[in-house]
Amino acid sequence: MPDVIGDLLAAFLPLFVAINIPGILPLYIGMTETFTPDERRQLLIRALFAALVLAVLMLFAGQVIFDTLGITLNDLRVGGGIILLVIAVTDLAFGDIKNRRAGKKEDRKTVEAAVREPVDLPIVPLGIPLIIGPGAITTILVTDGQVGWVVTLLSIALNMLLVFVVFTFGPSLMRLFGPGTSKAVAKVASLFLAAISVAMIRAGILGMVGAA
């Protein structure tokens, strides 16, 4: 029993650090500031499902998929970083302008619906690569080799449950501080998202150069 608990901790903690729940919570709050509680809950469930599917897929077939497609984790870092960077820059540079233009033509409810409708947040970027990204995938592959797939799968499930709990109650706590704070968090979150994307791209490029 102590060995099982030790193995579970050895698998859970690195994945918890790789997912970085405190770091991505403000991003989640910022991305969903115009969402209703029901919409936010549905989005979170879909994002966690996408993240869980990817995590399990990487656990059982990650190396095979990489070898078949001829890609590496560094390629994944660069690709994911570019996607995040485009999303962050679009929000920072054009988000307010787009909302102001829409406000001249439509009422507030229509604008909010228009803002929410085209954004496919559950899959990209929330589920992938924010919740399960290159760091989490690497951790899953490493812990699988160290403690086996059963313990690794359990650690994935526990981390997904923790994300669900924190992301469910986090936005409610932020609403206590008022809409101004929420908007400020959204902009700061976009800035940090841009920084995270640049860090992912840099790590991928350095990894490619080091492997060359």
Image (cartoon, rainbow, N blue to C red):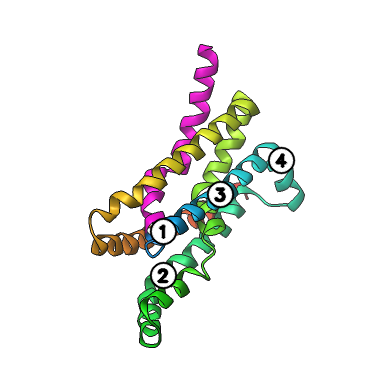
Extent of the magenta region: 1-29
Which structural element holds mark 3? helix
Tell me if label 2 and label 4 are in contact, CB under 8 Å: no
What is the quadrant of residue 33 in the picture?
Answer: bottom left
Q: Is residue 137 left or right of residue 65?
A: left
Can you identify the residue that label 4 sits on?
Answer: 61
Can you identify the residue that label 1 sits on?
Answer: 193
Which structural element holds mark 2? helix
Q: CA distance from mark 2 to mark 3?
A: 29 Å
Which structural element holds mark 1? helix
Say if 91 sits above or below 59 in the image.
Answer: below
Q: CA distance from mark 4 to mark 1?
A: 29 Å
Q: Residue at x 51, y 40 (%)?
A: 160
Which structural element holds mark 4? helix
Residue 106 in the image, given as x and y percentages of width and height: 40, 84
Which one is in front in this view, the residue at disc 2 or the one at disc 1? 2
